[in-house]
Image (cartoon, helix red, strand yellow):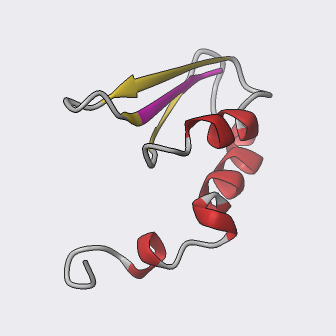
Amino acid sequence: IKLYEPSQAILAKENGLGIYAKILGKGKEYLTKNGVLYFEIGEKQAAEVSQLACKYGEIEILQDMNKRDRIMRIER
């Protein structure tokens, strides 16, 4: 893993939610109406990241080929 993943992916703060909180905290300043954010999420992070994104608009969780939650689509 060390050879292929950035250190932030391995040593993520706040149980891996820190970067999502940072982006979502500032996102409304930059995201236009009807703008869309996409996040790659861990298979067990959908509920927690959804909670951070609840102030936006529509939230959709997309699954990978193994039917695991993997992508979050957030529309303003």
Quarter-of-image position of residue 66: top left
Quarter-of-image position of residue 75: top right
Q: How many marks?
A: 0
Give the residue drawn at x 74%, y 35%.
51
10, 25: nearer the viewer: 10
Quarter-of-image position of residue 5: bottom left
Give the residue drawn at x 56%, y 36%.
46
Q: Does residue 67 belong to the magenta stretch?
A: no
Eyeballing the image, is 76 above or below 69?
Answer: above
Q: Position of residue 68 (x, y in %)?
A: 35, 34
Q: Position of residue 31 (x, y in %)?
A: 63, 33
Eyeballing the image, is 33 above or below 37?
Answer: above
Residue located farthest toward the right when viewing the structure as drawn: 55
**Magenta part, dominant SS:** strand
In the visual, does 66 lie left or right of 28? left
75, 69: nearer the viewer: 69
In the visual, does 17 lie left or right of 39? right
Quadrant of the drawing holding the C terminus? top right
Q: Which residues are magenta?
A: 71-76
30, 74: nearer the viewer: 74
Give the residue drawn at x 63%, y 57%.
17
Quadrant of the drawing holding the N terminus? bottom left
Q: Does residue 73 belong to the magenta stretch?
A: yes
In the visual, does 28 lie left or right of 64? right
32, 55: nearer the viewer: 55
Q: Position of residue 22 (x, y in %)?
A: 69, 57
Eyeballing the image, is 37 above or below 9?
Answer: above
Give the residue drawn at x 41%, y 81%.
7
